[in-house]
Amino acid sequence: MILIDQPYISSFLLKTIKENHLEIVSTEAARAMISDDSLNWISEKQAVEFIKNTPNCPLYTNSENTISWIEKNLASTKLPVQIQVFKNKITFRELLKAVFPDYFFKGIKFEELAHLSMENIKFPFIIKPAVGFFSLGVHKVDNPKEWPSVLNKITNDIAEIRSFYPNEVVDTSNFIVEECIEGEEYAMDCYFNKEGEPVILSIYHHRFSTGKDVNDRVYTTSEEIIEKHLPTMQKFLNTLGKLVNLKNFPFHVEVRIDKNGTIIPIEVNPMRFGGWCTTADLSYFAYGFNSYQYFLKGIKPNWKELFEKGKNKYYSLILLDNNSGIPESNIASFDYELLLSDFENPMELRKVDFNEYPFFGMVFVETSRGNEKELDQILISDLKKYIKVKSI
């Protein structure tokens, strides 16, 4: 069963629903986004009754905007509690205390941030909304002198964030302060199967331009990346699975691997894979399999066979966040054609209205081994070369 909501559904996910005759819940939000009456629509009442009477039935959502619907209609089921275990980063850290006893974190209300004492906090630290999405409101603080300017940035962030997403997706009333994990960051699309075993559907290296960078710009997958990290990531997820005891449950997890090889989770996003239909769709471009189908049918990837498609290639998701410093109100247009010309093999471009959301879209690219410079360049780019500013 599929539950759809704003802000976005990809043509690939829509095609998957249509061709496989998947049940899709006929909510007001879904109907506003999808006009195809030939889909296998089921009423909200039918969906609620089925989920209540069929514990652990596979349910996939494209967006965390659906959480409000789940909390309203499925309050008598386990789902709302299961979602909040992951969605609320403070609750999630409490869950992991026994596994990571030395990990520092602290929950704090927004109105108390101005009085936050720096005395007993480890530097550097990360501060972010306790319930968040897409690196919105995330900041790194290296020393006490930086705190006043970061606090000011957070205050400015809040009005913008609240205009984009509901509280169930990004709640700026509570924040979490946690130690900064030094190391390489990775993201994975996964699910717990009907036996409660975690299944990995992809592994992506999330690269950053500098130590201060907290943005989502480049996510890259390859045979090399998956083969190197699959065994240890599986062990980590097995440990996580024992803590939560979930079945037929999809999730997107972000972790860091420190210098000792220890995998430390950053966050787990429940009921979906990468936001805006990103990482699951990239797995199809890279390896030719459908993550949505694999979850709903309980299929495990046969990586040996799948790797035959992506030999000596890197597959990347490029998120075109507006880091130019130019306000959206001053931007006339974005030159997507120029952007595409800077890549060896762009596979798909998805444009986003930058006046509605603070980014220009995303592009999926295939890069030959030896040509990684194109990924390095977009990673550090402020995108100004693609932006046309309004004339005064």
Image (spheres, grey):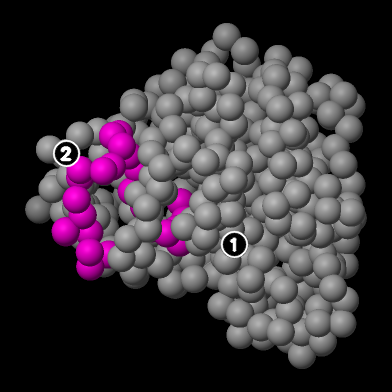
The residue under label 2 is: 144
Query: In the figure, residue 144 lies in which quadrant?
Result: top left
Please provide the residue range marked out in magenta: 110-134
Picture layout, residue 195 above or below residue 29: above
Query: For the residue labelled by badge 1, is the local secondary structure a helix, a strand or a loop?
Result: helix
| Residue 366 showing in the rendered view | no
Q: Position of residue 168 (x, y in %)?
A: 49, 71
The percent coordinates of residue 343 (x first, y second) are 51, 25
Q: Is residue 261 above or below residue 274?
A: above
Give the residue displayed 70% in from the left and 32% down from the top: 233
Does residue 132 show up magenta in the picture?
yes
Residue 37, label in figure: none
Q: Nearer the viewer, residue 134 or 282?
A: 134
Residue 132 visible: yes
Q: Which residue: 73% across, 79% down?
A: 77
- Which residue is under mark 1? 85
Residue 269's image quarter? bottom right
Residue 383 vs residue 188: left or right? left
Residue at the top extreme of this rendering: 370
Q: Residues within 10 Å of mark 2 (few under 14, many from 20)?
A: few
